[in-house]
């Protein structure tokens, strides 16, 4: 009798997680897969339409724009974030007075709510009274219409996302602490320059951390929502896609289809397309890591 109580006791202790997983994760995943093949608006029963939602999406110019923008933001934002993160981590690693303060200031934007950051950037990048164009004018540089021209609007999104690069810097900073100092000393004796030290010593050591960073940052860019949505917003509760659909992403267009137009079936189809895109790109990154990630087994 006692033997049967042990598994039951374990199940009872695990029941909060099991119930939460089934109700908040597994059921929504299965339901969204079903709804992606239906026409559903929350107020009427779903009607099975097969692959019609997917066909309509790939025949929709705005969806194609959302797909293209998401890929552009990912291809530009991920390497830029990694580059600034590694460079900033090296700067923050210098033994100078006030080092903890500088590290805290760099990390500070990462804990500022994204809504606050978005409206701050809307003010800074305003064409008429923004500080960015004001300082560009002082330097006799062009003063672009940041949120009114497609390419500059995309650049504004990149600027806002890179603004929170402090979290990436802190992770790299921790990784730099694991680099053996005796290897640097040996390289110094051999006359190695800074680039040789970085490529032969620093990079192999931090490459596993870089793999983690690439995957995390890539997923965040593929799901980009708040930054372009808030920068494109002109009037409350009215969908906006930015100049020339430059600020529409998979995340924003999915949200608008689901909660503005109540096209739950089409939004579910978009969610699965985004999931498959993210999974495929992540698998490619992991597969390629065998060539550039160094570990004790290599």
Image (tube, rainbow, N blue to C red):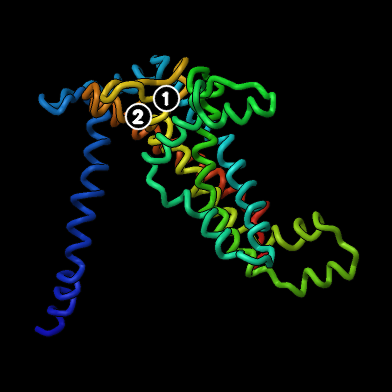
Which residue has dot 1 on it? Answer: 248
Q: Nearer the viewer, residue 164 or 135?
A: 135
Mark 1, Cα crowd under 10 Å, few <14 / some 14-19 / many 20+, is many
Q: Nearer the viewer, residue 154 or 36?
A: 154
Residue at far front of view: 138
List x then y, in percent, for residue 38: 22, 25
Q: Nearer the viewer, residue 77 or 130?
A: 130
Looking at the rendered image, the quarter that the C terminus falls into is: bottom right
List x then y, in percent, for residue 55: 35, 18
Residue 68 makes an appearance in the image: no
As displayed, is residue 85 above or below residue 34? below
Q: Is residue 224 left or right of residue 190?
A: left
List x then y, in percent, for residue 176: 64, 64
Q: Earlier in the sequence, mark 1 or mark 2?
A: 1
Q: Nearer the viewer, residue 184 or 214?
A: 184
Mark 2, Cα crowd under 10 Å, few <14 / some 14-19 / many 20+, is many
Residue 164 makes an appearance in the image: yes
Residue at the image point whose x is 18% and y is 71% from the top: 13
Residue at the image point whose x is 74% and y is 63% from the top: 201
Residue at far bottom of view: 2
As displayed, is residue 188 above or below residue 23? below
Q: Is residue 82 left or right of residue 235?
A: right
Q: Secondary structure at mark 1?
A: loop
Residue at the image point whose x is 40% and y is 25% from the top: 232
- Find the distance from the CA under tag 1 to the CA under tag 2: 13 Å
Answer with the quarter of the image where residue 32 lies: top left
* Of the two numbered discs 1 and 2 in the rendering, the one whose residue sits closer to the viewer: 1
Say which mark, if any, is on residue 130.
Answer: none
Say which mark, if any, is on residue 270.
Answer: 2
List x then y, in percent, for residue 36: 27, 29
Q: Secondary structure at mark 2?
A: helix
């Amino acid at each position: 009798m006692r033997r049967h109580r042990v598994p039951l006791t374990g199940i009872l202790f695990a029941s909060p997680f099991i119930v939460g997983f089934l109700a908040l994760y597994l059921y929504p995943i299965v339901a969204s897969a079903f709804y992606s093949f239906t026409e559903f608006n929350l107020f009427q029963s779903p009607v099975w339409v097969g692959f019609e939602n997917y066909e309509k999406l790939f025949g929709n110019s705005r969806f194609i724009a959302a797909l293209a923008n998401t890929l552009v933001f990912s291809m530009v934002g991920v390497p830029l974030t990694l580059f600034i993160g590694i460079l900033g981590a090296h700067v923050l690693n210098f033994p100078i007075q006030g080092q903890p303060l500088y590290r805290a200031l760099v990390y500070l934007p990462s804990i500022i709510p994204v809504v606050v950051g978005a409206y701050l950037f809307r003010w800074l990048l305003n064409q008429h009274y923004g500080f960015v164009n004001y300082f560009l004018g002082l330097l006799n540089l062009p003063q672009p219409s940041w949120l009114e021209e497609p390419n500059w609007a995309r650049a504004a999104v990149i600027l806002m996302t890179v603004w929170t690069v402090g979290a990436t810097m802190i992770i790299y900073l921790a990784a730099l602490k694991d680099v053996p100092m005796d290897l640097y000393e040996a390289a110094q004796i051999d006359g190695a320059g800074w680039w040789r030290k970085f490529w032969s010593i620093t990079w192999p050591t931090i490459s596993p951390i870089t793999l983690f960073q690439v995957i995390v940052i890539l997923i965040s860019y593929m799901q980009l929502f708040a930054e372009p949505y808030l920068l494109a917003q002109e009037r409350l509760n009215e969908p906006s896609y930015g100049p020339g659909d430059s600020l529409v992403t998979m995340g924003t267009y999915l949200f608008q289809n689901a909660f503005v137009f109540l096209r739950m079936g089409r939004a579910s189809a978009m969610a699965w397309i985004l999931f498959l895109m993210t999974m495929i790109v992540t698998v490619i990154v992991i597969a390629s890591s065998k060539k550039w990630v160094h570990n004790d087994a290599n």
